[in-house]
Amino acid sequence: MELERSMQHDNVISFAMELMSTDLSNYMYYESERCKRHARRWTAQIALGIESLHAMGIMHRDIKSENILVDARENVRIADFGLAHMESKPLHRWGEYASEFSGTPQCMAPEIFRNKAKPAEQMKRYGMAVDWWALGCLLFELESCRHEQLFVNEDEVHGYVSWHKKHCSLTQVYPKFEGLDAPVVGLLEGLLRISPSLRYSIGDLEKHEYFLRRNGCVIGRKPVI
């Protein structure tokens, strides 16, 4: 969201930004059918937003439906940077920048969970791939039948990791993905790869069949949205 202006009165500083209609969580609850029609376009917009943040050196670390705002034209904006990690230069795909246990458990990547309850000297650093994992969780919520969350708690995230390690050599689809369209499943599997280095990022999304349409691609450096 862009800052329109700022105002100062005595000891109070106010920031004026564009008025948003609602957040994506509320939209999925009350406007389910319309939400599904916009799912591909919104996923593209969020992906481009994440890529722009990374180019500015920002790792959001809390991408979730409550932090995605919908404006009057039904375009989405990423909000709430309270848990963001900031660097002075663009983030590199294979860079490792933070080690704090930070985020919302339902959308938290495995590499963040591994630092839970560990002393600072034992924590392992992670990078921008945590935001792409969170996008995968949000994509499932958008595309699933009742907009349910993919992972309700930490145990389900660990369960997914265990399942993936057991079935990594098979073509079996994760049970919760069954019933979704093949392009959705393919994108979910790419965004939710356990290894951060193998996880999809913007370059993989730009050419993924989920975003393809007859007259072009929904996502790109100059997105058709």
Image: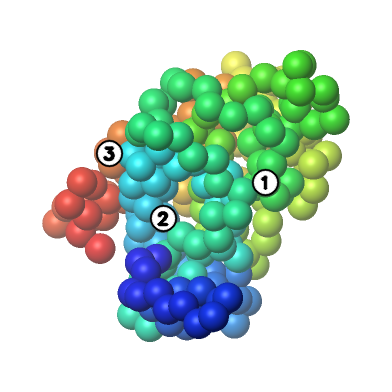
In whole angstroms, how far apart are the C-alphas of marks 2 and 1?
A: 18 Å
In percent of the image, x 20 and y 59: which residue is there? Answer: 224
- The residue labelled by disc 1 is 103
State which quarter of the image contains the N terminus.
Answer: bottom left
Q: Position of residue 115 (x, y in %)?
A: 75, 27
- Tell me the kind of residue under disc 1: Gly
Q: Position of residue 38 (x, y in %)?
A: 40, 68
- Tell me the kind of residue under disc 2: Ile
Q: In terms of image quadrants, where is residue 208?
A: top left
In whole angstroms, how far apart are the C-alphas of marks 3 and 1?
A: 29 Å
In percent of the image, x 35 and y 33: which residue is there? Answer: 90
Name the N-terminal-most of marks 3 and 1: 1
Q: Using a 10 Å C-alpha cutoff, classify the residue at mark 2 as few (fewer than 14 neighbours), some (14 to 19) or many (20 or more).
A: some
Q: Which is closer to the viewer, label 3 or label 1?
A: 1
Relative to 149, 129 lies left or right: left
In whole angstroms, how far apart are the C-alphas of marks 2 and 3?
A: 16 Å
What SS does tag 3 mark? loop
Kindly check if marks 3 and 1 are in contact, taking CB atoms under 8 A apart as contact. Answer: no
Q: In terms of image quadrants, where is residue 144?
A: bottom right
- The residue labelled by disc 2 is 46
Relative to 99, 127 lies left or right: left
Residue 70's place in the image compared with 186, above or below, is below
